[in-house]
Image: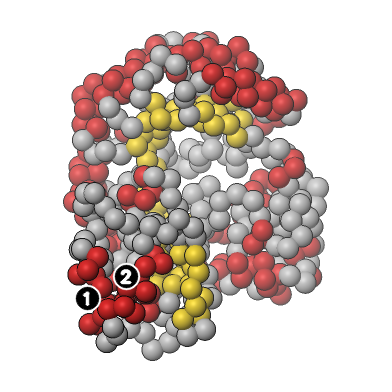
Amino acid sequence: MQHDSDRVVLSATPFAKEKGVRWFSMIHPFYAMLFSLISTPKEKKEAIMAISYFFSISKEKAEKLIEPFINNDEHKSAIYEGIKSFFPKDVIVQAEEIYDYEEYEPKQFIFKNVDTEFRRMKLAPYSILLIINNTCATNCIYCYADKVHKCEQPLSFEEIVSILNDAKSFGIRDFQIIGGEFFLFNKWEELLTLMEEMGFHVDMLSTKIPLSKEQIAKFKRFGIRLQISLDSLNTEILQSTLNVSESYSKNIQKTIKEIDASGIRYQIATVLTRETANTENLNILYDFINTLDNVIRWEIRCAFRSLYTAVDFSTIQVPTSFYETLEDWYKKVIKSSNKNIQIATENDHKYRYSITGSNDFEGPRCSANRSNMVILPDGKVTICEQLYWNPRFIIGDIRKNNIREIWTGERAIALAEFKQSQVQKKSLCSDCEIYEKCHKFVNICIANVLKAYGDENWDFPDPRCEKAPEFFYPL
């Protein structure tokens, strides 16, 4: 639970996230006080006594208060003082063993006023993403990262430590790291050790770099899920699509086998381009993955256009005709496979369908400048990891201001509360009757707007909106 001015944010614990649970909602402080009384592990009878004493109610009433939240098998809502709060499954669980937990006190959640309607975090973001570098061991033709921007003065380890302390002081629990290439950061082990000591749970790290046995052994002790990229086993194809050496294929396969034998929880990610989008390549990968004992997931998706793709995307784009072939291949292999295989494709039917605004857009909820901020390798702060150093979306500099000052600063607020009167007239959002509703909820992917219409048209409708015009550029 995170204190946020005049409401409380309820979110998934690291233990819940490991089980695939993602949750983020505003709840009335009454429920925060209730849950705080059992935030430390205790017997149910003891919990009922604590609730009864604090609220000056009978034990029977105390039990009725918490019973609906114990091992509840459905999402639920509850109304207190006319304010509706939303809760996930398993708010309170009976644990066979004690996991890491956060201790709270009821007095932390006593407010004069309560506001659960405003969607943006008020005091500080719920989560922070640090892009540790924008350097890689590969140079993929479909690369999604801005590797052109030269980071002249990257954050030092000491500065990163200061940022972590800053985040901790503002009650931020979710602090994630990506690259570039994380394992090219020369103090990655020290950083993970510090984050572990401070209670920051890193969900997953991705890599394309062949790792040594020593690196694998060091990484294993952190218990972090690892994602390995593997698009093909063909040496020539990898040389042309990833711009790697002849030995890369052999070395990355060796790394994967050693990770598999180490006991690290890991998954494999495959990105298909025109050259790799064929069943022969998929079957070769499938045969290799079947030799692995401990891979927990294989995710296959088709490359999508990036803001930073160095080549003409149409030359590497997977033909739309292959999507059906991929679906058929998947249905065939999944019947006989004991592996967790997932596929994802970008189809036109995902666009221009919504008539009710961003609240009903398919896909994950956008957290940019609502609950999440992104710190770039040089300390500049942006709203989305895909936007990198685009000056329109830079909201601060962590070297000049702390997290709260940036989050509550003029630039961040101006983007969060962008008014309809500020929208350029050529955008169909400028006179849309549901603009206020759509932008109050805010689930608009600015990166996709830029991909479809260009930087100068950043305030055009999200491509999922029925009012979105024909794309200027292919997605």
Quadrant in the picture for residue 203 = top left
What label sits on residue 49 in the rendered view? 1
Q: Does residue 255 appear in this view?
A: no
Residue in the image at 60% along x and 64% along y: 442
What label sits on residue 444 in the rendered view? none
Q: Is residue 176 left or right of residue 147?
A: left
Residue in the image at 22% along x and 76% along y: 50
Q: Is residue 392 left or right of residue 436?
A: left
- Say which amino acid is labelled 1: Met
Instruction: State the count of labels.
Output: 2
* Residue 340 location (% of width, % of height): 48, 29
What label sits on residue 35 in the rendered view? 2
Q: Quadrant of the N terminus?
A: bottom left
State the SS at label 2.
helix
Crowding near the residue tagged with mark 1, few <14, some 14–19, many ≥20 C-alpha atoms within 10 Å? some
> Residue 297 or 411: which is nearer the viewer?
297
Q: Earlier in the sequence, mark 1 or mark 2?
A: 2
> Residue 21 or 240: which is nearer the viewer?
21
Q: Does residue 217 appear in this view?
A: yes
Q: Is residue 61 left or right of residue 344?
A: left
Q: Quadrant of the C terminus?
A: top right
State the SS at label 1.
helix
* Residue 436 location (% of width, % of height): 68, 73
Quadrant in the picture for residue 163 = bottom left
Residue at the bottom extreme? Answer: 112
* Residue 303 location (% of width, % of height): 60, 32
- Above or below, 177 against 288 in this view is below
* Residue 302 location (% of width, % of height): 61, 30
- Say which amino acid is labelled 2: Phe
> Residue 114 or 331: which is nearer the viewer?
331
Instruction: Tell me the mark number nearer the camera, choosing from 1 and 2.
Output: 1
Distance from Cα at disc 1 to Cα at disc 2:
13 Å
